[in-house]
Image: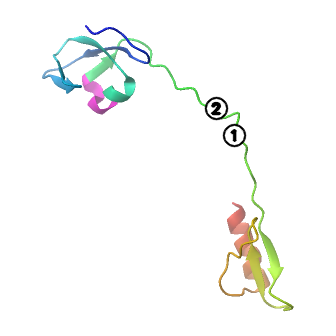
Amino acid sequence: MKAKTDGQIRYKKVGGGSLRMHRKIIKPGEIFYACPADVAKFGNAVVPLENIPKPATEVDDVKVIKTEYKVMPRGKSKLWFDVVGPNGKLLNEKALKKDVAEQLVKDLAR
């Protein structure tokens, strides 16, 4: 049995046949050390004998940025409007009526 290294846990090969992993042949009933990512492709032919550690996630440091879209009149027109993104970029190619532009802003805000 190979010595344990960082991030590896013990597994046991169940069922018939053998597996080839990292130029080694693992026979039925054999206990070996491997990383969970390496063993995932073998499905239920391999059973963990230890608890699989859960990867640490740093969700607390992620900031959610709410993007704001604005409806702005096109030039001096009171009938045609554009939808402008947070960086000042136009999101529509053709001019829109006010109700259509406001609906686009609602859809983008979802």
Which residues, given as a range, are shown in magenta? 40-45
> Could you give the CA–CA distance between mark 2 and mark 1, rounded to whole angstroms?
7 Å
Q: Which mark is residue 58?
A: 2
- Locate residue 60 relative to residue 7 in the image: left or right: right
Which residue, given by chain and number where applicable, does mark 1 sit on?
62
Q: Of helix, strand and loop, which mostly describes the magenta segment? A: helix
**Residue 108 at what x, y percent from top left?**
69, 66
**43 or 95: which is nearer to us?**
95
In this rendering, the answer to whether 102 lies above or below 73 is above
Q: Quadrant of the N terminus?
A: top left
Q: Quadrant of the C terminus?
A: bottom right
Quarter assignment of residue 66 = bottom right
Number of labels in the image equals: 2
In this rendering, the answer to whether 81 lies above or below 26 is below
Q: Residue at the spot x=39%, y=17% of the render?
A: 8
Q: Are marks 2 and 1 in contact (CB under 8 Å)?
A: yes
- Locate residue 33 relative to residue 67 in the image: left or right: left
**Residue 31 at what x, y percent from top left?**
26, 10
SS at circle 2: loop
SS at circle 1: loop
10 Å neighbourhood of mark 1: few (<14), some, or many (≥20)? few
**85 or 42: which is nearer to us?**
85
Type of amino acid under label 2:
Glu
In this rendering, the answer to whether 51 lies above or below 44 is above
